[in-house]
Every structure is written in structure tokens, then in C-alpha cells.
Amino acid sequence: MNGVDAPGHGAMAVPRFLAELAAWVAAPWALAPHSVPLAVLAVVVLVGLPTVFATPGDKASVIVAVPGYVTVALVLLQLAAAVAASWAAWPPPVAVAVTALCAAVVVFEVPRWRWLLTERRNARV
């Protein structure tokens, strides 16, 4: 499977990607009127952390290996940023759609999160 053993890839990853995209756009959009450096930092954190830190078997290429619970926490960070920033930056109908998307992601992610949170993936990496 191209070095990826975790469930929740392929078509199941589409909602997660859309939620990540919402976070990447909404967070700097919400922060830029207050602080451009903070908006840039938000993008660096939201894009950079999941790029650098990953659980072996969940991504084909891992730069820095971390336990599964770190990967789950990074997804939750993305979802929280998407929801909070969408409500701060966009009209309510768009924020409702992003919130619903993020709720769906939580449902779709359950098998992957169970896989990531197994003892074997949380042993010392």
C-alpha cells in the first residue's frame, strides 16, 4: 500500500483534506486583520507540523516519527482551527458548512484514530 498501512486513506481522506484546507485558509484570514505575522505563523503551524511530524505507517514518507496520539492531536488542531477561524472570518452559512464538514471528519476518522492509538503505534518511536 505504498508504505501506508493505516485505514482512512484514499476517498476517506477527502473530507479530512477539505477540512485542513479550510483551516489553512480561514486561520490566516481571521488573524490577518489583527496581525500579519500571526497569520503567517498560523499557516506555518497548520501546514508545517503535520508535514514534519507523522506516525510511521500512516504516511508513506515520515520526516520525524511520532506516536499515533500526536498525529490524532494534529488532526484535532486542524479541525479546531477550521471551525474557530471560519466563524471568525466568514459568513455564518459558510461557517456552518465548515463546522458540519469537521463533524463529519471526526466520524470518518474513527477507524484511523483507533489504528493510530493502538499500543504498538504509541510505543517509543
Image (cartoon, rainbow, N blue to C red):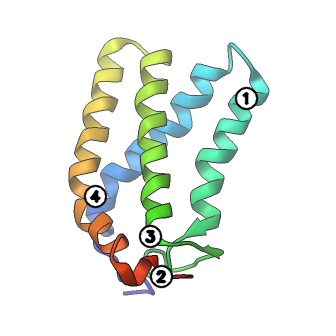
Quadrant of res 100: top left
x, y percentage for residue 51? 61, 62
Which residue in the structure is indicated by mark 3?
68
x, y percentage for residue 3? 45, 87
Of labels 1 and 2, the one closer to you: 2
Q: For mark 2, does the 10 Å Cα neighbourhood hold few (<14), some (14 to 19), or many (20 or more) residues?
A: few
Which residue in the structure is indicated by mark 2?
123
Which residue in the structure is indicated by mark 1?
38
Confirm or deny contact between disc 3 and disc 2 (CB under 8 A). Answer: no
Mark-to-mark CA distance, 3 and 1: 28 Å
Mark-to-mark CA distance, 4 and 2: 21 Å
Above or below residue 119? Residue 100 is above
x, y percentage for residue 66? 56, 72
Q: Secondary structure at mark 3?
A: helix
Q: Residue at x 36, y 80 (%)?
A: 119
Q: For mark 1, does the 10 Å Cα neighbourhood hold few (<14), some (14 to 19), or many (20 or more) residues?
A: some
Confirm or deny contact between disc 4 and disc 2 (CB under 8 A). Answer: no
Type of amino acid at the residue the image marks with label 1:
Leu
Residue 115 visible? yes
Front-lying residue, 13 or 121: 121
Above or below residue 43? Residue 33 is above
